[in-house]
């Protein structure tokens, strides 16, 4: 079952979602304060997957705004993983000794309602370029302990392939950078962007491959178009891992996660991380307890091959880093 939208444009407003048959017009005015604070963006691929007749649709829950996002909860943090605390120059987060985040832009192909950087991303937020990009790359060059650079944002694969290739080339010129990783939703939510030019930009001949970490939360996201995009990356020799967020109402049961992890392995992606939800503002309705998460993942472990099992990871509030949670 799909929504009523037939064109190929991204839904960027409540009006677009009403036109698509995904939000009741009677609710539209009440959602204005939500979209005034947090951006809306639902790609054509994701729009096509939403069942408007299912009030519990796991795709809709990830992307359609609700008034629950205006509810404050104890422990909410605008910067829940402490990026600002560990940012020595614009665009760089240096939380761990041997690796940095390089935040190239603040734009995404979709805007997830649970995003932990929801206060920082959105249309018109700009990109790291010119002198600011030079300073960020200079910081990496000046710190020989940096072994890995993780491109994030925003979503790096929203960039034009030529510009992305230029950044990757400059990183490869820094000899102590031995590993580059890209965190992205694009192969899943906008698979058409993974075209020949993008694959060529990512897979330039080098002894230091680019790792692609694909963010996906439900097996229904991995339809034929997403699988084809992922296989294009795999055929180019790009190693692929995944990251998932444990989300109430989306994947907080063992059956949903089993289906997701099996599907990922079937299309050549190793499940790497499943993140405990971060305390970003307006996301309390997505949160599960650590005890619930451990119980769910222990059930998954009993069902699945070890190849399907990711690391269950929690960010320490305020920026002290990740902690693995046993299950």
Image (cartoon, rainbow, N blue to C red):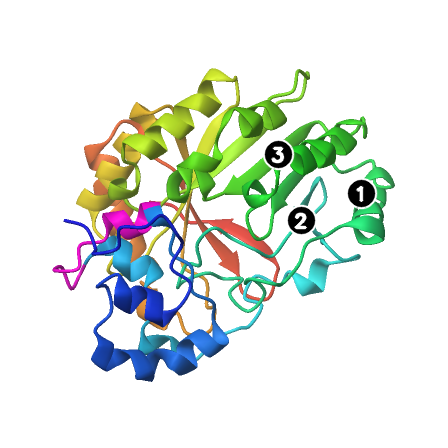
Q: Is residue 142 magenta?
A: no
For this view, does 290 lie left or right of residue 130?
left
Q: Is residue 55 magenta?
A: yes
- Which residues make up the magenta segment? 45-56
Assign a secondary structure to mark 1.
Answer: helix
Q: Residue at x 42, y 35 (%)?
A: 192
Point out the tag, 3 or 1, that comes first from the N-terminus: 1
Q: Tell me if label 2 and label 3 are in contact, CB under 8 Å.
A: no
x then y, percent, for residue 288: 31, 63
Residue 104 numbered tag: 2
Q: Which residue is mark 3?
A: 161
Please say if 38 is above or below 93. Answer: below
Neighbour class for label 2 at 10 Å: few (<14), some, many (≥20)?
A: many
Q: Residue at x 35, y 34 (%)?
A: 226
For this view, does 1 lie left or right of residue 131?
left
Point out the tag, 2 or 3, that comes first from the N-terminus: 2
Residue 264 shows up from this direction: no
Residue 113 shows up from this direction: yes
x then y, percent, for residue 154: 57, 53
Q: How many angstroms separate mark 2 from mark 3 (CA)? A: 13 Å
Q: Can you tell which quarter of the image residue 149 is in?
A: top right
x then y, percent, for residue 301: 26, 37
Assign a secondary structure to mark 3.
Answer: helix
Neighbour class for label 3 at 10 Å: few (<14), some, many (≥20)?
A: many
For this view, does 70 lie left or right of residue 195?
left
Point out the tag, 2 or 1, that comes first from the N-terminus: 2
Q: Residue at x 34, y 79 (%)?
A: 31
- Where, quadrant-wise, is the C terminus in this rendering? top left
Q: Which residue is mark 1?
A: 137
Q: How many angstroms separate mark 3 from mark 1 (CA)? A: 19 Å
Q: Can you tell which quarter of the image residue 56 is in?
A: bottom left
């Amino acid at each position: 079952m799909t929504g009523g939208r037939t064109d190929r444009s991204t839904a960027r407003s409540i009006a677009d979602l009403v036109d698509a048959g995904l939000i009741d017009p009677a609710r539209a005015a009440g959602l204005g304060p939500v979209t005034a604070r947090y951006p809306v963006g639902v790609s054509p691929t994701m729009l096509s997957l939403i069942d408007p007749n299912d009030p519990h649709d796991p795709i809709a829950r990830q992307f359609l705004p609700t008034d629950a996002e205006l509810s404050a909860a104890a422990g909410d943090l605008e910067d829940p993983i402490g990026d600002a605390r560990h940012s020595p120059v614009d665009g760089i987060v240096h939380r761990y000794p041997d690796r940095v985040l390089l935040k190239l832009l603040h734009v995404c192909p979709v805007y997830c309602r649970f995003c932990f950087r929801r206060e920082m991303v959105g249309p018109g937020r700009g990109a790291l370029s010119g002198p600011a990009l030079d300073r960020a790359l200079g910081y990496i060059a000046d710190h020989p302990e940096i072994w890995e650079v993780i491109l994030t944002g925003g979503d790096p694969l929203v960039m034009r392939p030529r510009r992305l290739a230029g950044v990757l080339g400059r990183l490869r010129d820094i000899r102590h950078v031995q590993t580059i990783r890209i965190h992205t939703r694009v192969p899943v939510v906008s698979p058409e962007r993974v075209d020949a030019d993008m694959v060529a930009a990512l897979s330039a001949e080098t002894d230091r491959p680019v790792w692609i970490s694909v963010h996906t939360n439900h097996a229904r996201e991995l339809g034929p178009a997403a699988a084809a995009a992922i296989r294009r990356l795999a055929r180019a020799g790009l190693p692929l891992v995944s990251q998932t967020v444990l989300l109430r109402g989306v994947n907080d049961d063992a059956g949903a996660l089993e289906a997701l992890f099996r599907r990922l392995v079937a299309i050549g992606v190793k499940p790497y991380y499943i993140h405990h939800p971060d305390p970003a503002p307006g996301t309390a309705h997505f949160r599960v307890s650590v005890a619930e998460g451990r119980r769910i993942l222990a059930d998954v472990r009993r069902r699945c091959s070890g190849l399907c099992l990711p690391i269950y990871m929690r960010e320490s509030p305020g920026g002290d880093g990740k902690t693995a949670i046993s299950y």
